[in-house]
Image: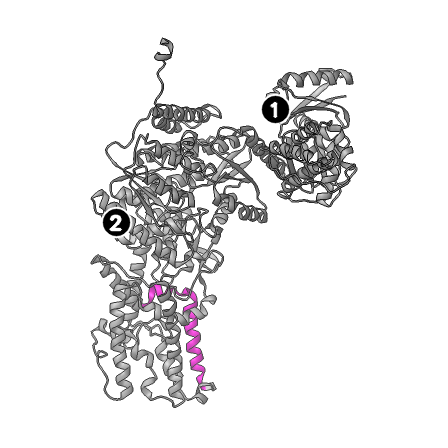
Amino acid sequence: MNSLQSHAIETPNEKQNRHKAMEAIKVLNTLKEGFKAPPKAMDYFYNLFEDVYCKQKPLHKDKVKVGTMCIQIPSEIIYALDGVPIRLCNGFYTDDEIGSEFLPQKACPLVKASVGHLASKNLIDKPDMIYSPTTCDQKTKAGTLIKSFGYDVVDVDFPRTKESEISREFFRRSIREFSADLSLKMGKKLSRKKLKASISKIGYAQSLYHRLSDFRKNRAVPILGNDMFLVTNAFFFDKIDNWIDACEKLVDELEQRVKDDIHAGGKISPRIVYTGSPPIFPNYKIPIIIEDSDAIIVADETCSSNRMFNDRVAVDEWFVNDMIDSLADKYLKACTCPIFSKNDDRIRRIIELVRSFNADGVIYQAFAGCTVYELEQRSVLEAMEREGISILYIESDYSPSQQGQLSTRVEAFVESLKIKNRNKT
Amino acid sequence: MRYFTGIDIGSTAIKITIIDENKELVGHKISASGSMFYKYAHQTLDDLMKELNISKDDIAYTVATGYGRKLFKEADENISEITANAIGAVAAAKEYGEIKTIINIGGQDSKAISLDDMGNVVNFAMNDRCAAGTGKFLDACAMNLEIGVEELAHRHFSSKGTPLSINSTCAVFAESEIIGLLGNNHSVEDIVCGVHYSIAKRVIKLVKRVGIKEGIYFDGGPALNAGLVNAIENELGKKIFIPAYPQVTTSYGAAILGVDSYSYQNRE
Amino acid sequence: MKRIRDFIHKADMKRFRFWLQIFFFVIFIYGGYFAINLGTSIPVFSCGFDQEVGGMCYFLPLQHQLARPLDVLFSVASISVLIGFVTFLLWFIVFNKAWCGYACPLGTMQDWLTGLRKRLGIRYSTYTQPQFNKLKKIKYIMLALVILSPMAVGMGLLEREWVTAFCSICPGRMVTPLFVGDTSQWSLDFSSKSAMILTALGLVFTGLFVVGSFVKKRFFCFFCPMSAMHYIFSDAALLKLKKDGDKCTKCGDCYAVCDMQIKDIADDVTSTNILRDDCILCLKCVAACPEDDALHVDILNMKLFTSTKGGFEKRMGMQTYKGAADE
């Protein structure tokens, strides 16, 4: 009798934290020890993720946290109003299972995980308000679902076409509304000086990413794709000044590594461009399989990494409304999310990345249940075929199973790239 | 004379092929994987070597492939079964002509591979999440009809009526469907035919994903089933090439890769 | 060599343009004081009604030349018309529409009004796309007026006041002489009905010009017949605005800064020659492009000024990475 009573049952929150910590530490250990020695500057990021996901350390205690459901909410405006943007896109299988109670089984695992996380109310840096752009169907419906959990959720209208003048004006108005709403909630007015400063700071963060990316164009790639994903994922929730400092150190170290000709991959590792549904920590299943199979990811076209940093904002006359309009334009026009009717920009971007990073092939990963990425697969595959670029289409989800099946496909693809390279010489 | 070994550790069966340095087939052996396939793989290899009178020292290079390739640590190299299958198919069909498309139906999966003019893999599609359209399905059906797997071909060709259509997408539910058909007095032959066509249709769908190009090679254990071959040919509307030993194409390919790797590593 | 290139690509375009515009303004408006005479085929609105003009707007002599009777116009006596035209073309071909962005006195005046507006903290206004589409045809109608009105006089269809019909309604005629203290153009000519109509229109358009340029960047350039004339020959020019569509990420930064609201600059990723009829070649788009080599201005197929990441960061006042050695 005693042994049964003394066995305390975990609360659901404790269990969730423990499982998530297990998932997180597994991936972090793989990155730290499973490959060649990573740059020392990466220690900051490994420790950051461990602090947040294993030790449940909150980062933004006395700031107002503004949650965002997708990449299209301008963080510049949030910083200018003294808020902290927190991207709520989630990568944990634990949260995915919780979310399965609220969403159909076949739904996108990313949305399920985000919903599950918010449903559990077990958040370290809980957002005070959430802005949800109406991007894909699942995110759009999830917004209202999350509201029913008691969060303050505001829908931000996002157009499904981006070529027309109508969509430009539509989104400009939408962002003005967003900015007015946030301003009201924060009790502050959007000042010209602060907005210009935040555009400048985020622009600087973006240019640091550009510099990091440029190092990967080198024949000897100084950093693994997985490590880069970790760095960009950190931007979702980290203090921006700390992130900038850590990146500066990383830039210095990578510069040295390039001089010393240190290569994070193998001698004949094929160079891969990764695109598709975003790999969000700790769901690095596919990128880890890729780099385990003796290939190296040199560039990516995903909204959790490249897309956040790629395009910078130009303003003609630094008035508040001018800046807001320029931001709205950039977040709409440059966006290559597959929710748009046409996806020519995404195809051009992938081709441009393959060319400028001298890649051997593209791996296109879609979540099972992500309608838009699955639908786009055909046009992207055809475009790659026309350009003579090898591409592998692979479907996965957040569950830890199917490792063998996925690795077989990736390895077969990597082997075919190696043979192709050998035949070229 | 140096010998090279290719070991294909599948989920259902272990296939081992030994070739000489001129890439000529010396011998092969097939055994069941069971639950301890590591032990059985070693045992099968030892048995084969004994049969061919080859000692361990004569083996210059070993390549492992298949589901369990990473666990066979004694191999000098391991490659995916897709690459191995492609190499093996091109070599085995040398006299027949150029191979551009490979259909493989294994114990628990099925694959379609598309090759370019030089025999390199350009595209592939796999069905490894569902047993419908795999060897398992044939086994299960044979068991339900209370006949042996080797009888399936004969029954297929003895069918008098049109092949019955098996509608279930799941191999498990298809069993119930078969029992239902038996209950309605359909003949075993017609049911067997229906099963073959059901598998054929499923496999063709898979092949369409990589494109059907002339020069079609069919391997894997079920390729021994002439009835299934007949169904696939009729569904494709084309003739397909069956090698003499369809189960060992992949291990044969692995062994050939071994020869190439060995000479590349030991070149002057 | 690299340092010179970096200096050019990272240049502060605003300051460069400001001083170059002043330079040309002085030469054209006050040239007479320095005994400068660059002829009468100048491809900008350097108004001939200014007594001290240093080089005259081509439209003034053109209209007078076209006012001859048709049989004279198409005879050998009109070799002077041809010479005038060829001289105009030769001036134009060197700098293409950069004349508009850097040299035109009327353009410079508009930029000064814009500067005033910015200092007052007032935001600019823009056209909506339907408005834009309808209004952009007006410049061709103006060009038709420049050419056909004098010819109609030559054919005896209109009175003599209509020879310089365009000059009568052009804001340049009224505003430019003010800079040398000449207010004589600010009047209504009651001598005849045509004169009354034309000078009244002149006053109205000048008023529109001042107000319009204050609220909208380069308001007049949108309707300018000289711009229309330029565009007809811009393919032959030496200076070209080029775009490399593969590098363009469609971020829309160039469109956001374009005074003339040209959409193609951002949205067209297939054409290489991206100069459109409204373009004044001010190069603000190249300066605002955050990608390397997506937009550039070439002279004789050599890159003169190209968009660079470093240049973008500097111009937008962004912190650049310490000791950022340029690539």
Which label was assigned to residue A21? none
- Mark 2 lies on a secondary structure that is helix
Left or right: A252 in relation to A371: left
x and y, in percent, of residue C118 in the image: 24, 58
* Membership of C103 in magenta stretch: yes
Question: A95 or C182, which lies in front?
Answer: A95
**Prevailing SS of the magenta stretch:** helix
Residue nearest the observer in this picture, C311 or C190: C190
Farthest-out residue, front: B184
Amino acid found under the numbered disc labelled 2:
Ala
Subunit of label 1: B
Residue occupied by mark 2: A180
C246 horizontally vs A390: left or right:
left
- Please report the bounds of the magenta region as a residue range: C77-105
Q: Is residue B171 magenta?
A: no
Marks 2 and 1 sit apart, C-alpha to C-alpha, by 60 Å
